Amino acid sequence: AIGMEIRPRYFHTFTGVTYWDDIFITPLSTLTEAMDGMNLLANGDMEDFKPSYWEAEGDGAIWNMMESRTPEFSLELSGAAEAEWKQPEAILNWAPGHPAGGNPELIVGGYVKTVGVNTAPASDDEKFQLIFNWFTDATQTVNVLGESLVLDLPQDAADSDGWVKIDNVSLGALTFPGEQAAKSATVTFRKGANTTGTAYLDDIFMVKADPTAD
């Protein structure tokens, strides 16, 4: 390569003014794990001094400034009733979409920590869960996969051993069938109404299974 061009830009749904500074080029190997593999999910590490693009529902949904995997914030769920943190749009503001036909395959998940939670949950009402949905358009009326991708937090013990990674690897890399590209997505961190204890979420990721894929 004898030349290079860099184009700072924003996507079609943005409005207003953007400012750019400190653009850098570095070997991929020097980036942190949160960026490795080209993370497609914005603000997965929660470090903007506010939970950008996240909405809290229920008294137990707390913006926590004491617990984190990557300093210094996380999403917390606790209390005696159902609660959730939801990112109502995890694609449209950041990228045109996720293509169909299995290219690229995706791995999604996050890092979680549990303290004093109920064990051996028998139903979703007794579980903490991280839930992903993908849709064919911005109205979010047709689910590309036909159902939610649900990752249960580990509840085999009351307290987790520090921060634990959960993802869809055991289910197989995520692909979108046929010609059904995903144009919109949601991410929900959910606490069932009958759960007890506290769960934290940080460093959410949505990455290519093969970082070199197009």
Image (cartoon, grey):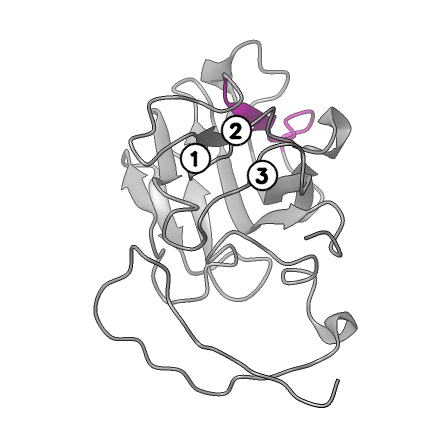
- Which element is circle 2 on? strand
Query: x, y percentage for residue 35?
Result: 63, 63
Mark 1 / mark 3, whichever is N-terminal: 3
- Badge 3 crowding class, 10 Å Cα cut-off, few under 14, some 14 to 19, many 20 or more, is many
- What's the amino acid at mark 1? Thr
**Numbered label attached to residue 91:** none
| Extent of the magenta region | 147-158
User: Mark 3 highlights which residue?
Assistant: 114
Mark 2 / mark 1, whichever is N-terminal: 2
Is 46 on the left-hand or right-hand side of 168? left
Residue beneath the point at 68% across and 67% down:
32
* 38, 95: nearer the viewer: 95
- Badge 1 crowding class, 10 Å Cα cut-off, few under 14, some 14 to 19, many 20 or more, is some
**Numbered label attached to residue 188:** 1
Q: What is the distance, in whole Å, between disc 2 and disc 1 at their CAs?
A: 8 Å
- Residue 166 lies within the magenta run: no
User: Mark 2 highlights which residue?
Assistant: 129
Q: Nearer the viewer, mark 1 or mark 3?
A: 1
Mark 2 / mark 3, whichever is N-terminal: 3
| Quarter-of-image position of residue 139 | top left
Residue beneath the point at 74% across and 29% down:
172
Query: x, y percentage for residue 93?
Result: 36, 53
Query: x, y percentage for residue 114?
Result: 58, 39
- What's the amino acid at mark 3? Thr
